[in-house]
Image (cartoon, helix red, strand yellow):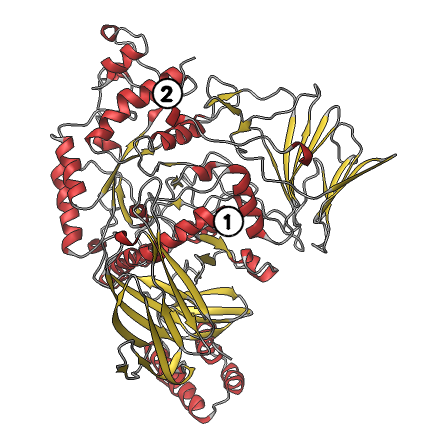
């Protein structure tokens, strides 16, 4: 077998300490953490110590536990679990694990007994799925690590890894991982990363907007499109070129043109110049490949690859795709992909659609493509990245995920927030969807705009559409209100990159995916019921709008559980009390994004879409509680040189502090311009470091100052710092003014509000009017926001 290059070998530490293992003639129980167990049964008494596709790191350190044996068998106790085992072949009556500490009804697991969901107990809350290809709405999800029962079990059926290559497992063995983390979903995911490996740190440029379309562009057309985006101040960081970059209309003697590795020089006469042009315009480039048909005799790189594989190039014999062969893998990467990367291709869109079988039983070709392309992309000291479908637990190590060709409908939009957030339950944090929908479905400008808004708050924001002249996602093709919302979403995405990149580092180092379900921080049924609402990093909560506008109110709405505490709308400044369900109403220009009081969110300035470490920052502070946020920046290298800047808000003292930056200060400007925006306070002024004062004004207090990076600064607020008023009357007037109802109805409501000031009495009086439900709900949102 051909030895793999060193860069294609993944590091692992797969052997758990002997003192963590309890071993019998045919079983081995490994205590990985107080709440995670490895349970193996082997008819031959041989156990698997090699790394596997799922598990790379079983040496997680010592764990305190004790074992008691009696006539019934073995009993193992940790601080969180009790295992009872009769020491025979695994069976429902002979192997159970239960949790300690009151983790709820149905918290006992029995081998090979799947919990049946009921209206009272959902059970496993799901992980993710391989693809959304052709899906209109929802798909079933594979299991994740989080359950209302408090436990989840993964069976490791993947192949072993040895000397950088895959190898068969010991035949007949059972290999299970039990996660008994109760309702601590975040801890379950963190320890899964310890076992399987962390999410890699994405390159900073991957967090901007991606342009993608299945369309036969010429080089001139693609360049003209990018220039139009630039003229309209619509920022993009990645240019994805779908399959028409290569020849697709080929001689039928070779088969069909779905697979290809040679530039279509009718469309792209000078590929290196085209790629260089995109780079000059600040774009990274990805090309789509469908590898299944291998490399055929008409391809540019066929002679070199054929010779490497022992094929006479004159024979025309195809180099069949055989990812299960290390000889083919290394030749395929070195002779086909590397020369194109040298010309300027930054990463590959691996569009595998041909099933899960190879010449090696149990080996999924998709996993192999993801694994080796990702490792190969790091060979020259670059930060690695690939773009492909999900291939099972452990796939989080190979971002970014391509979710497939979804149908353009409201049902598809409605499923994507849930699908994205729930993937955190299996550690899969970097999904990229076809924002706006891929194909079929309907033309609906409001739907497109709402999808763009979701994209701004998605792990990856990649616009996409099919080869249909009517299906493009260029904002100027839509009506004025939709276009405005779409353009705002694209600009906001790039402004969010300082926050997003900090969260990407947090996902890598702290094991906290960017997008997570609510129950990761508030494990209760109401949070589980709010399927589409998600946490966006450490500071924000997003409740996506996935249904059309109501005709009467001219607003769309979403109902969500709002966790305990106080929250402030990121865009409007309205303050909400949590610990309850709320129905949020927004026009097409608005979107429900809430910050918990104490949140600190750094953005770039409104006109700064460059993704480099910025010279200026706009920092939003949501007063009401103490806040602490450490901005992360680096040089985007494979082994980064980090620089951090800590921001703190002292609620009692009314002081915002920018600490002296630490780390690689040469990556930052010597002096950075700041615009500090303090939300949620009325009647405040600000004292600047030079002793000058910024007077209070309507709306959030906004202060601009320049700060020496090496020393930091302090901003002190003066005044009584009382919570800002929600301006209920003014907002209600705007709501009623826009409502498509009788003028008489508007006046009755307005007069009632003028004569009654107590919120609950106002609500009771309006309920008595028998208003249309949508109008009453929108009024109640404002009346009760901070009640």
- Asked if residue 401 lies left or right of residue 765, the reply is left
Q: The N terminus is located in which quarter?
A: top left
- Asked if residue 497 lies left or right of residue 111, the reply is left
Q: Closer to the observer: label 2 or label 1?
A: 2
Considering only order in the chain, which callout, 1 or 2, is on the residue closer to the N terminus? 2
Q: Position of residue 224 (x, y in %)?
A: 12, 45
- Asked if residue 669 lies left or right of residue 88, the reply is left
Q: Which mark is residue 329?
A: 2
Q: Position of residue 362 (x, y in %)?
A: 53, 23
Judge whether 241 appears above or below 539 on screen.
above
- Asked if residue 143 lies left or right of residue 256, the reply is right
Q: Within the image, what quadrant is residue 136 found in? A: top left
Q: How many numbered discs?
A: 2
236 or 66, which is in the foreground? 66
Residue occupying the far front of the picture: 711
Q: Position of residue 467 (x, y in %)?
A: 26, 39
82 or 664, which is in the foreground? 664
At label 2, counting other C-alpha atoms closer than 10 Å, the crowd grade (few under 14, some 14-19, many 20 or more) is: some
Judge whether 226 appears above or below 499 on screen.
above
Q: Within the image, what quadrant is residue 444 found in? A: bottom left
Q: CA distance from mark 2 to mark 1?
A: 33 Å
Judge whether 270 appears above or below 594 on screen.
above
- Inspect this view and state whether residue 589 appears: no
Q: Which mark is residue 422?
A: 1
For mark 2, give the secondary structure: helix
């Amino acid at each position: 077998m051909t030895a793999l290059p060193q860069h294609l070998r993944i590091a692992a530490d797969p052997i758990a300490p002997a003192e963590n293992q309890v071993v019998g003639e045919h079983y081995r129980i490994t205590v990985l953490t107080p709440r995670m167990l490895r349970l193996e049964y082997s008819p031959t008494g041989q156990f698997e110590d090699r790394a596997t596709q799922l598990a790379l790191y079983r040496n997680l350190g010592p764990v305190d536990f004790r074992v008691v044996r009696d006539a019934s068998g073995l009993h193992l106790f940790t601080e969180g679990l009790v295992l009872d085992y009769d020491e025979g072949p695994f069976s429902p009556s002979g192997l159970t694990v239960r949790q300690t500490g009151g983790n709820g009804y149905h918290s006992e697991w029995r081998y090979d007994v799947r919990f049946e969901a009921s209206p009272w107990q959902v059970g496993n809350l799901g992980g993710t799925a391989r693809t959304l290809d052709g899906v209109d709405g929802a798909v079933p999800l594979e299991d994740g690590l989080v359950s209302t029962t408090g436990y989840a079990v993964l069976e490791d059926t993947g192949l072993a890894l040895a000397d950088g290559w895959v190898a068969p497992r010991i035949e007949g063995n059972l290999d299970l991982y039990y996660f008994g983390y109760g309702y601590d979903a975040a801890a379950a995911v963190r320890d899964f990363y310890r076992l399987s490996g962390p999410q890699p740190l994405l390159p900073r440029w991957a967090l901007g907007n991606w342009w993608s379309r299945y369309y036969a562009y010429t080089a001139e057309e693609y360049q003209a499109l990018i220039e139009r985006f630039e003229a309209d101040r619509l920022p993009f960081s990645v240019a994805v070129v779908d399959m028409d970059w290569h020849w697709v209309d080929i001689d039928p003697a070779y088969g069909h043109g779905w697979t290809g590795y040679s530039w279509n020089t009718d469309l792209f006469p000078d590929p290196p110049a085209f790629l260089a042009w995109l780079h000059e315009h600040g774009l990274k480039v990805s090309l789509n490949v469908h590898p299944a048909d291998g490399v055929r005799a008409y391809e540019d790189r066929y002679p070199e690859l054929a010779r490497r594989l022992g094929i006479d190039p004159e024979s025309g014999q195809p180099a069949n795709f055989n990812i299960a062969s290390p000889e083919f893998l290394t030749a395929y990467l070195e002779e086909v992909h590397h020369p194109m990367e040298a010309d300027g291709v930054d990463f590959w869109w691996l569009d595998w659609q041909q099933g899960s079988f190879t010449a090696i039983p149990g080996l999924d070709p998709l996993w192999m493509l993801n694994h080796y392309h990702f490792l190969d992309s790091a060979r020259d000291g670059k930060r690695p990245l690939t773009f492909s479908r999900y291939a099972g637990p452990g796939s989080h190590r190979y971002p970014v995920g391509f979710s497939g060709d979804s149908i353009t409908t409201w049902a598809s939009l409605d499923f994507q927030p849930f699908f994205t957030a729930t993937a955190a339950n299996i550690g899969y944090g970097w999904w990229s969807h076809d924002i706006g929908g891929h194909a079929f479905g309907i033309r609906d400008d409001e739907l497109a705009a709402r999808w763009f808004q979701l994209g701004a708050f998605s792990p990856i924001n990649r616009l996409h559409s099919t080869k249909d002249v009517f299906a493009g996602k260029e904002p100027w093709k839509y009506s004025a209100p939709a276009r405005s919302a779409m353009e705002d979403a694209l600009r906001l995405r790039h402004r969010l990159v300082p926050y997003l990149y900090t969260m990407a580092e947090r996902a890598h180092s702290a094991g906290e995916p960017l997008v997570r379900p609510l129950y990761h921080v508030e494990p209760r049924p109401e949070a589980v019921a709010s399927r589409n609402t998600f946490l966006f990093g450490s500071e924000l909560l997003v409740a996506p709008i996935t249904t059309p506008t109501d005709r009467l109110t001219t607003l769309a709405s979403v109902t969500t559980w709002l966790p305990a505490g106080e929250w402030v709308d990121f865009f409007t400044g309205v303050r909400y009390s949590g610990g309850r369900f709320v129905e949020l109403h927004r026009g097409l220009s608005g979107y429900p994004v809430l910050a918990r009081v104490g949140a600190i969110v750094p953005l770039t300035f409104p006109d700064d879409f460059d993704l480099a470490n910025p010279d200026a920052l706009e920092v939003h502070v949501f007063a009401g509680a103490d806040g602490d946020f450490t901005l992360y920046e680096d040089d985007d290298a494979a082994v980064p040189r980090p620089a951090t800047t800590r921001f703190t808000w002292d609620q009692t003292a009314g002081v915002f502090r920018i600490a002296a930056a630490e780390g690689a200060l040469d990556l930052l400007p010597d002096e950075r311009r700041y615009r500090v925006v303090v939300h949620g306070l009325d009647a405040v002024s600000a004292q600047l470091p030079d002793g000058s004062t910024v007077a209070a004004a309507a709306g959030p207090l906004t202060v601009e100052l320049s700060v020496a990076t090496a020393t930091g600064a302090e901003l002190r607020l003066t005044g009584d710092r009382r919570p800002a008023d929600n301006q209920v009357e003014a907002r209600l007037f705007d709501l009623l003014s826009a409502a498509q109802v009788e003028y008489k109805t508007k006046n009755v409501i307005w007069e009632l509000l003028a004569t009654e000031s107590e919120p609950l009495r106002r609500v009771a009086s309006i309920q008595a009017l028998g208003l249309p439900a949508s109008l009453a709900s929108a009024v109640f949102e404002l009346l009760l926001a901070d009640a």
